Amino acid sequence: MNDLELLASLESVKDPCFERTLKDLKMLAGASEQDGRWTIQIQLPTHAYLCKEELTAAIKSAVAAAHPEAGDVDVEYSVKVLGKNAGGSIGLNVKNVIAVGSGKGGVGKSTVAAALAYGLQSFGATVGLMDADVYGPSIPHLVGADGEPEVIEKENPDGQKVQRLQPIMADGMPMMSIGFMIPEDQAVIWRGPMLHKLLTQFMQQTDWGELDYLIIDMPPGTGDVAITLSQMVSLAGAVVVCTPQKVALLDAVKAIGMYKQVKIPVLGIVENMSGDIFGRGGAAKKAEELSLAPLGEIPSDPVIREYGDEGQISRLFSEENPAKEPLEKMCAEVAGQIVLNSLDAPSMPSLEIL
Ligand code: ADP
């Protein structure tokens, strides 16, 4: 038996998280032998993967069945985040741009966006967070970031001088928000062209660096920011956040319709404040009705509100607390849905005119 024969016997093994074969998922990266012991190399398509233990067991039993002579094997994991280099045409070096939206305010959209960003980072991914909720920027408050983004003059590859915005760093994560640029209590009326200019600065003139994921906290409801974004980059998709009760679900359905209209694929629905006075499971049911993925249920938990109010959302992942597990699951569901979408469908064309 050689490495290719060993790997061939694993091609039809189903990944317990994705329920697809290792061959389809392109996860079989190699096999090598040292001192008579084999190691199988598995390349994961995302850091946010929660099935290592089950997959290791499935691989070991498949090897034992097909090649008993191989003996006990080791399984070694590496990660190469799957993505479509969303902003190639505007020089944005991000594999996956994820919009986090909702039908209305107050459902915990910004909290979920920040938690998604820090959760993916805690798994090991490189992540940025962009606050596009221009009508109520709350990311700076949630993550405890302030300051004014610095503008640096740089030379682009053509030798031209260009102004580049430096994102604000908070707990090792680059972020941008209109909240860094205007006083907290100042209301802003946005006209279309101003909004477009601001988003262009955030996406195109900001030194984000190389990212696996850029999470965008969208304004609730309306579609103008979504349209502008979809014209600039090819988004991996939108996560729609809602609370479990009926009225909130109706708003979420409207948001889903809006994303579909502007050709941003909807990754699924996150139910936030689940199990509260609002009930539980409504979003999963609605997702099923709409043939969308349920992306997890986040309980209503004082620790989430507390850490958010204190500007310490990242602590939800660095410390033990009751919300950690459901939040990590939500991150894995979102990242997993992106992987499945990229297997199933060629990337959606970005919108040219609207
Ligand atoms: P939105 O962005 O939808 O307007 P926010 O993220 O600002 O909503 O959240 C609204 C309020 O609800 C905040 O005070 C936040 O701390 C709280 N909150 C959000 N999600 C939860 C949760 N799962 N458990 C407890 N409090 C939450």
Image (cartoon, rainbow, N blue to C red):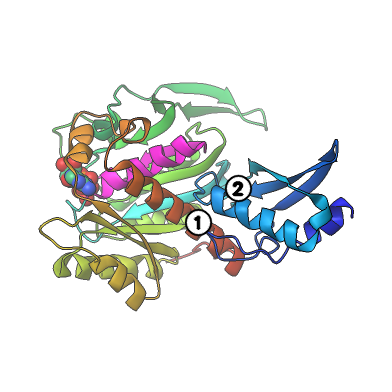
Under mark 2, the amino acid is Gly
Res. 188 visible in picture: no
Crowding at dot 1, Cα within 10 Å, few <14 / some 14-19 / many 20+, comes out as many
Q: Which residues are magenta?
A: 108-134
Under mark 1, the amino acid is Gly
Q: Which residue is mark 2?
A: 88
Q: Position of residue 167 (x, y in %)?
A: 42, 29
Above or below, 173 relative to 42? above
SS of the residue under disc 1: helix
SS of the residue under disc 2: helix
Q: Which residue is mark 1?
A: 336
Q: Position of residue 125 (x, y in %)?
A: 52, 38
Residue visible at 29% across and 65% down in the picture: 255
Locate ligand 1 by image quadrant.
top left
The mark nearer the N terminus, 2 or 1, is 2
Which quadrant is the C terminus positioned in?
bottom left
Above or below, 81 relative to 8? above
